[in-house]
Image (cartoon, rainbow, N blue to C red):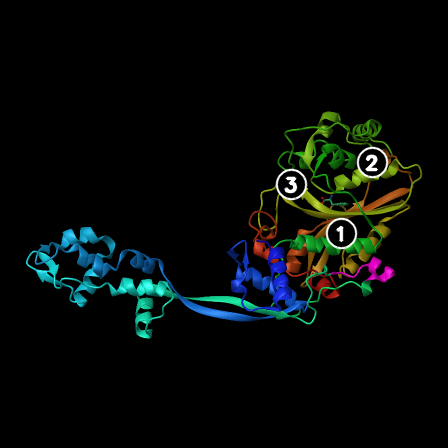
Amino acid sequence: MSIQEIQELVLQTVEDYGFIEDTATLRIDDAKLDQLAVLGVLNALLSREIVSYSVIEVEYWVLTDEGAQIADNGSPEIMVFNAIPTGDDSISIPALQKLVGDSYKFGQGAAFKNKWIKKSSAGLARNVDSVIDSTQADLLAIRSGTVLTDKIMTDYKKRKLIDRKKLSSYSVAKGPKFTTTIEKEETDITHEMISSGEWKNVQFKKYNFSPGVTGGAPRGGHLHPLMKVREEFRQIFLELGFTEMPTNKFVDSSFWNFDALFQPQQHPARDAHDTFFLKDPATDDKFPPEYTQRVKEVHTNGGYGSIGYGYDWKKEEAEKLILRTHTTAVSSNMLYQLAQEKEFRPVKYFSIDRVFRNETTDATHLAEFHQLEGVVADRGLTLGDLIGVLHNFFAKLGIPKIKFKPAFNPYTEPRLGKWVEIGNSGMFRPEMLRPLGLPEDVSVIAWGLGLERPTMIKYGYDDIRELLGHKVNIDMVQKNPICRLDKKMGREL
Ligand code: PHE
């Protein structure tokens, strides 16, 4: 029977008779109603003042499984008595035990206590000619609704032959807004309702402010701390007018990850010890042929004022598919696409996503982690712009003091009196930019940093493996607080 059917029956009965004395008497197709379902229906109707109700609580005795068995088959003591031969004949205890089975021990004790049986030379014999099984008689009486003296009832309850049960049912009366036709209640007021004036006619569902109905915290859908910090960084980039690059390609060709960035094919980073190579498919050759030609040329012979590396550049090496080792693989591709546009336009791009390196993991290294990257392309940018942009960016993070170290060295920032490496930056070399086809006066500044380190500092982790990977505690993901990189947080960083 459905909730709908129960509701209809309740309302129709109240309509026909004015009230329901006891919902336990209601039937649908001869079946009693589930009173818990009735309660649900009544509460819903009560909240809309369609009915009111009061609880009828009945307590009654029921036989337990054991009690029911005695009612059906007799008590253990009668089973023992019946198994003993009539008259003065005896029976051995093992034989008796076998006849009575499981309840022998209790039955024998009770039969002795009742003086029904006595010891004999060969075992046990009857002490009386006939007995009345009062336990069975009592249980049969209780089963049919008779309540015996308190002493007897407590005794049977102690023996776990009977138990007390509670049954709730309800008496129902009309509420102030009684009706048998129930309109759907709206839960939201919509734009359409307001503009048409319809809101005046519809029924709104009432808020339920009763204690205990605050709802549970959702069990799923928690953001990982890295994703919380990513969102904060993302907001900073967006506030600074940057556009997010599409970073959904974890697999990329060596071409965009290395060659386009003027990283020679013998570079140690391109070794299988540092980079994850794909087996199947192992290669992809779909990169622009003319541009590829220019990349080959600059690696081999140089150009744009460079002498190049002077080695034999191989397309097969560039075709190798890898798990990208940095998000700069995305930046090189985006800059290529920018260079294909008819007119050059300045851009500010950013990305924050996962990268992969074939590293042995330890407290500070993982084989996969996240990088954040900013790229600015405009005419006439200088190192001064790079420094300025980075100052701006880190000031937004609440880190006003940063120090730059030249060349390959990462730059650093102060924390607890010492400088901590947080990132890497630079201006793209002509060897990387010119083959793309960007105008000669266009410079590109870029910087990158890991997402894990600031997240570890923010959430207080010493071991990166507690943050990402198979050792992560799911509880940590559910319970970590929201992330706000405000000025105060900046000082903490
Ligand atoms: N790709 C560099 C790295 O993985 C980070 C970087 C990005 C450095 C852009 C300079 C410019 O460490």
Q: How many marks?
A: 3
| Residue 148: image tag | none
Q: Is residue 441 left or right of residue 82?
A: right
Measured in 3D between alpha carbons, the distance from the residue under mark 3 to the one under mark 2, in whole angstroms, is 25 Å
Q: Secondary structure at mark 3?
A: loop
**Residue lying at 74% horizontally and 56% vertically, measured from the top left:** 232
Locate residue 210: give its quadrant.
bottom right
Q: Position of residue 383 (x, y in %)?
A: 84, 49
Measured in 3D between alpha carbons, the distance from the residue under mark 3 to the one under mark 1, in whole angstroms, is 25 Å
Q: Which residue is mark 2?
A: 431
User: Of the residues shown, which amino acid type is indicated by label 2?
Assistant: Glu
Q: Secondary structure at mark 1?
A: loop
Q: Which residue is mark 3?
A: 357
Q: Position of residue 51 (x, y in %)?
A: 64, 68
Residues under numbered marks 1 and 2 in contact, where contact means CB atoms less than 8 Å apart: no
Residues under numbered marks 3 and 2 in contact, where contact means CB atoms less than 8 Å apart: no
